[in-house]
Amino acid sequence: MTATPEQQVAALQARYLPDVQAWLRDALADPAPGSAPGPAPGINHLLRYHMGWEDAGGAPTPSEGGKALRPVLCLTACELAGGDWRRALPAAAALELVHNFSLVHDDIQDGDVLRRGRETLWSVWGIPAALSGGNAMRVTADRTLAKLEGSGVGAAAVMWASAELNQRYLEMIEGQYLDMAFEQRPQVTVADYLDMIGRKTGALFESAMFLGALVANADPDQARAFGACGRRMGIAFQVRDDYLGVWGDTAETLKPLTDIQRKKKSLPLVYLLEAAADEDRAWLARAYADDEVSGPNVRRILRLLDRLDARRYVTQTAEACASEARALAEALGLGESRARSLEAIAAYCVSRDR
């Protein structure tokens, strides 16, 4: 019986993530007494809380963590490019730290008080402390990536890796800026939106596959080819996230409000604003001008989306991006059997329920 994409991704997570978690826990551990100066007392506790490892009082908590797809992609790419995936562990851990740095700041910017079913960092300790914590997480990511050299990666490849990660998380920050700016714009085109999520989500997926391939053989041209595949996967992943943000089961997604209630200009609404009749667009502008979208207005927006068959449009957009990722994976020349893991991840990006 053929495994589903979810089962195949779960197998990759089981293979790689215990070692990634060990690197992450080491990166966010408090320094031993008498060791060289480390982070300010207490700041790593904030970060361990955000990661789901501790409660607000510092007691250990059971945590499934996030999906950690970026580390999985990094280590998969390293192995597929012919390398020992264990050498890429510093890069995989750094990617997860950068991702979580962005989540800490995104929660502040979006005013979200819950993430993964628990209070967000800023809602417990306040915005100044959370900003400091997010910044500390980003610097810890840079320090973790630098440990590639200790894994046997050459100095030139470590420099390429550092330049790549810096460029991509700058793009990620630009994408978050654009996402917030779009909330104030009356009209956002689908093309504008896809460019934004290519930065906000696609850039770090690209970096994941680039870094993994680079560690394998220090060939930047091959690494860029892997990275292009990762970027399309990231866009597909975000488009599916947009679908779940409107039509997903909140018990599965762990989001207390839909994207409509949160007034997010995700792809379903961007498509609606582009395709709706003039009178419906005028009404939408008034509905989104209120402090919050009321229940009756949410239901009317859902009816408008149904009238335009928006579910099918969003799903087809995600599937098209995943198809492009699969074509780029095939062009890598890995062979059918070796490329199956990338195909499974691409399929998972558009079929997941959370």
Image (cartoon, helix red, strand yellow):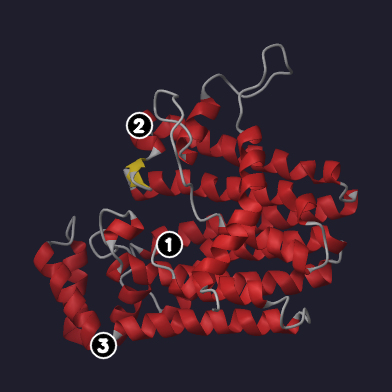
Asked whether, in this view, residue 217 is left or right of residue 223, the answer is: right
Locate residue 52, reporting x and y percent: 45, 39
| Residue occupied by mark 1 | 179
Indicate the secondary structure of the residue bearing disc 1: helix
| Residue occupied by mark 3 | 308
Looking at the picture, tell me which residue is in the foreground, 176 or 86: 86
Asked whether, in this view, residue 67 is left or right of residue 28, the answer is: left
Q: Earlier in the sequence, mark 1 or mark 3?
A: 1
The residue positioned 18% from the left and 55% from the top of the image is: 291
The residue positioned 53% from the left and 63% from the top of the image is: 201
Give yes or no for contact between labels 2 and 3 (Cβ–Cβ under 8 Å).
no
Q: Nearer the viewer, mark 1 or mark 3?
A: 3
Looking at the picture, tell me which residue is in the foreground, 224 or 85: 85
67 up-or-down from 146: above or below = below
- Amino acid type at image mark 1: Asp
| Residue occupied by mark 2 | 124
Asked whether, in this view, residue 343 is left or right of residue 146, the answer is: left
The residue positioned 61% from the left and 23% from the top of the image is: 30
* Residue furthest out toward the front: 1
